[in-house]
DNA sequence: TCTTGACTTGGAGTTAACTATAGATTATAA
DNA sequence: TTATAATCTATAGTTAACTCCAAGTCAAGA
């Protein structure tokens, strides 16, 4: 039922060094160990890893994730604090989503120009909105 | 018509150190100077800055931006190479957009739970899809 | 002209997030 | 049991992208 560090790392496509690092800095809670000291990841531990990896992929800082974990372990009196933290992070991601959208649109435009250009041999811009390259 | 480094930096909300750094590593082409050696930014230079800042905000690496500028300055024989570079970067941004979307949705779910929780005083998960926190 | 403030270069320092190394211990398979 | 593979800790190193600093030069107003 429970998994080794290697198995968890394969599941989430990260390295054992990274996973131990996440535990050390509190991005995930401390995991259970065998009598010999080897880490074992049960369902709950894997849930925390999933959460950490998902947040990191979107660009949430390890510091914010660790803060959430810290608050979580303090119990029910931190519900509001956790809500505030998550709301703040969501705001950041929504802003990032806007930036991303704008840049993808700019790239779409440029790429369409280049697709023309590689056929005609000439690159021509519309020179709209301060764009010159 | 042309702008000082300070004016350009205010326009794009970056620091002069960053702008000089961008020029030094080729993220923007070298800009014109006054006889005394002070940088002046004309329309075209500002277009390049705009481009760099936009790409950086979306997470495109300075290396990729500099490579594009390098190819651009080599002329028409690099049209295909520039198209390939831009296409590759767009792919990365589209993938990032997916990650961002997934994480925002997860956050939306969590936040809705926490909004309930701060009223009821109890936090309860649906425990779907490996989520445990 | 003087002085105050903006600008210059070259290089060093910082921060976040890993990533690698060494040397010891534990686990697994023949 | 013995070799081989996986894991452990502690700590140092790396990378990307700035960011700061010193010491000198340039520009604009009184």
Image (cartoon, coloured by chain):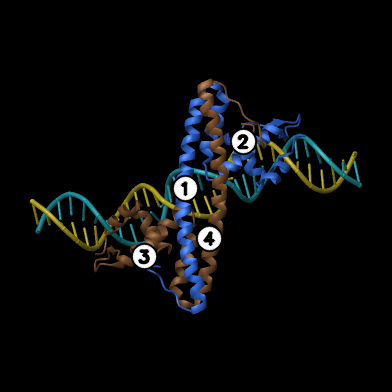
Chain colours: A blue, B brown, C cyan, D yellow
- Disc 2 and disc 1 in contact, CB within 8 angstroms: no
Callout 1: few (<14), some (14-19), or many (20+) C-alpha neighbours within 10 Å?
some
Q: Tell me residue A82's x, y (percent).
A: 51, 29
Q: Residue at 58% of width from left, 36% of height from top? A: A27
Question: Callout 1: residue from which chain?
Answer: A
Q: Which mark is residue B89?
A: 4
Q: Tell me residue C6's x, y (percent).
A: 24, 54
Q: Residue at 46% of width from left, 36% of height from top? A: A88
Q: Which mark is residue A128?
A: 3
- Disc 1 and disc 4 in contact, CB within 8 angstroms: no
Residue underneath mark 1: A96
Q: Judge whether B19 appears above or below B43 on screen.
A: above
Callout 2: few (<14), some (14-19), or many (20+) C-alpha neighbours within 10 Å?
some
Q: Judge whether A28 appears above or below B67 on screen.
A: above
- Name the side, left or right, on which A61 lies relative to A15: left
Q: Which mark is residue A23?
A: 2
Q: At numbered mark 3, what does the secondary structure look like: helix, strand or loop?
A: loop
Callout 4: few (<14), some (14-19), or many (20+) C-alpha neighbours within 10 Å?
many
| Closer to viewer: mark 3 or mark 4 | 3
Q: Residue at 61% of width from left, 38% of height from top? A: A51
Task: Please state which of residues A16 and B127 is positioned toward the viewer in this rendering.
Answer: B127
Q: Earlier in the sequence, mark 2 or mark 1?
A: 2
Q: Tell me residue B125's x, y (percent).
A: 62, 29
Quadrant that contains the C terminus of chain A? bottom left
């Amino acid at each position: 039922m429970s998994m080794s560090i290697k198995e968890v790392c394969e599941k989430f496509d990260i390295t054992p060094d990274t996973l131990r690092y996440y535990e050390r800095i509190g991005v995930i809670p401390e995991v259970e160990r065998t009598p010999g000291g080897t880490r074992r990841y049960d369902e709950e531990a894997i849930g925390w890893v999933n959460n950490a990896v998902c947040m990191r992929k979107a660009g949430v800082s390890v510091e914010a994730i660790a803060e959430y974990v810290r608050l979580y372990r303090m119990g029910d009196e931190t519900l509001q604090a956790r809500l505030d933290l998550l709301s703040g992070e969501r705001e950041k991601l929504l802003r990032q989503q806007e930036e991303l959208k704008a840049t993808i649109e700019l790239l779409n435009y440029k790429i369409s120009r280049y697709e023309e250009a590689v056929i005609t041999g000439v690159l021509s811009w519309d020179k709209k909105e301060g764009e010159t390259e």
